[in-house]
Structures are given as structure tokens and as C-alpha cells.
Image (cartoon, grey):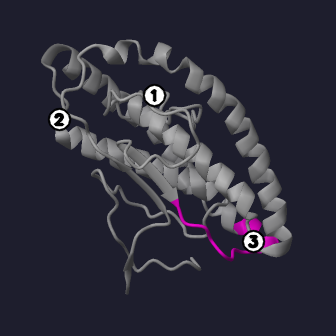
């Protein structure tokens, strides 16, 4: 049994001295991001369809499509972290698909050199149905990927609690942040798996906290 990090790594740092009221207008401030991300997610879906057929016949995810989709996920996570999936920073997210190491929210996905091909690929994707259901429950009935993983659900309830605490008590409980990170991590893992970006099945566990925990016994062939 070896210890490794899951191929989709999602991290975030809770920033100190958060504004009491800024969350009230973040939806307005993020309009430019949401406009960009709507079009990017349309392209993401098309890229995933193209990647599916490439995987079906070759077992390889075209690197250009993969890097594009990682960029969309990365941008979405930064916006989610700033907005109503975490509310954990007041630092405005950069408008870019590239990696921004000094931003408090980061996402990376390892490129899989080889994946399944042919009919086993379809069966492997269908195995994710239980995970898709759990992720939908966490994210509020579905993936609102246009810059926010939560449109309600468990994460939405937690963010409502955080918003009230920020407004009236000017505090963000660390344990609430940690579990919120775990739920967001679960949603993004499942989203990347559903987009065929990794052959490694998402673990049925909540990895709470700002950084990734080792995935013990990970098998890239699973």
C-alpha cells in the first residue's frame, strides 16, 4: 500500500480580516468572470466530447484539450473560492486560465498518459453515477460551473451560515472552512472524473482542510 496524492489537487487558504459585507456584492463584481466562464464551459463540454472520441479509439486524452479543460477548472475554482462556494478571500480572482501560484486558491490535475479505450471507457464512466449523485447533493442539485460550484445544497447552507457570521460577528469558523474545502474538493474531483480527465476513481471520503491529504493505496488502474 503506497501513499500518494489524488490526481486532482484542490487547495485554498482562508484569508484573515475578511470584510463583513463584501459578500453581499461579490455576485455583481464577478459578472465579467461569469460571462467569460459561460463561454468557457460551453467550450469545455465540446472539448470533453472530442476527448471522449479520442479516448474511445486511442486511449489517450489529447494534451491540448486536457490543458484547456484544466484551465477552465482552475479559473472556476478561483472564482468559487472568492464567491459563494467558500467566501474565503476578498482578493479578486485574476481573469486567466493559467496558474497563479500566489492566489490563495489553486487547482492542479495530473495528465494521465494512458486511459481506457473502447467500450470499457463507457462502463468506467458509468461507474461514477453514485459519485455524481453525491456531488450534486453537495453542490445543490447540479454543477453550477460558471464560476461557482454551489447553487444551494450542503455547500450553499454552509455559505449562508458563514455569511451571517461574517456580517454580524466578523468571524469565519476554521472548522466550517475546513469542511467546506472538503466538500468542494469532492465536487471538483467528481467533475474532473466525469470529464474523463483521470482514470482514478474519486475516493468516498471528505478530505477536509486547506491542502490535500495522501490517498493511501491509490491505483491508477482503478
User: Up-down: is 125 above or below 181?
Assistant: below
Q: Residue at x 32, y 16 (%)?
A: 22
- Please, what secondary structure does the residue beneath circle 2 have? loop
Which callout, 2 or 1, points to the residue nearer the camera? 2
The mark that comes first in sequence, 1 or 3, is 3
Q: Are marks 1 and 3 in contact (CB under 8 Å)?
A: no
- Please, what secondary structure does the residue beneath circle 1 have? loop
The residues tagged by marks 2 and 1 sit, at their Cα atoms, a distance apart of: 20 Å
The residues tagged by marks 1 and 3 sit, at their Cα atoms, a distance apart of: 36 Å
The residue singled out by tag 3 in the image is 60
Camera sees residue 136: no
| Residue 115 in picture, x, y percent from top left | 69, 74
| Residue 174 in picture, x, y percent from top left | 18, 40
| Residue 11 in picture, x, y percent from top left | 37, 51
The mark that comes first in sequence, 2 or 3, is 3
Q: Residue at x 73, y 58 (%)?
A: 64
The residues tagged by marks 2 and 3 sit, at their Cα atoms, a distance apart of: 43 Å
Task: Residue 152: give its label.
Answer: 1
Amino acid at each position: 500500500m503506497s501513499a500518494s496524492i489524488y490526481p486532482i489537487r484542490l487547495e485554498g487558504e482562508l484569508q484573515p480580516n475578511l470584510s463583513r459585507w463584501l459578500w453581499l456584492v461579490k455576485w455583481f463584481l464577478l459578472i465579467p468572470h461569469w460571462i467569460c466562464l459561460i463561454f468557457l464551459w460551453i467550450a469545455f463540454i465540446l472539448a470533453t466530447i472530442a476527448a471522449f472520441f479520442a479516448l474511445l479509439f486511442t486511449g489517450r486524452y489529447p494534451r491540448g484539450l486536457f490543458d484547456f479543460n484544466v484551465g477552465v477548472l482552475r479559473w472556476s475554482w478561483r472564482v468559487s473560492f472568492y464567491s459563494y462556494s467558500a467566501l474565503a478571500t476578498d482578493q479578486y480572482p485574476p481573469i486567466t486560465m493559467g496558474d497563479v501560484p500566489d492566489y490563495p486558491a489553486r487547482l492542479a490535475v495530473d495528465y494521465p498518459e494512458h486511459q481506457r479505450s473502447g467500450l470499457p471507457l463507457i462502463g468506467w464512466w458509468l461507474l461514477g453515477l453514485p459519485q455524481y449523485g453525491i456531488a450534486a447533493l453537495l453542490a445543490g442539485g447540479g454543477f453550477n460551473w460558471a464560476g461557482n460550484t454551489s447553487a444551494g445544497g450542503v455547500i450553499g447552507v454552509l455559505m449562508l451560515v458563514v455569511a451571517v457570521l461574517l456580517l454580524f460577528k466578523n468571524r469565519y469558523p476554521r472548522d466550517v472552512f475546513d469542511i467546506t474545502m472538503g466538500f468542494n474538493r469532492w465536487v471538483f474531483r467528481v467533475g474532473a472524473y466525469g470529464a474523463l480527465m483521470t482514470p482514478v476513481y474519486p475516493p468516498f471520503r471528505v478530505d477536509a482542510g486547506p491542502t490535500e491529504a495522501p490517498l493511501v493505496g491509490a491505483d491508477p488502474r482503478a
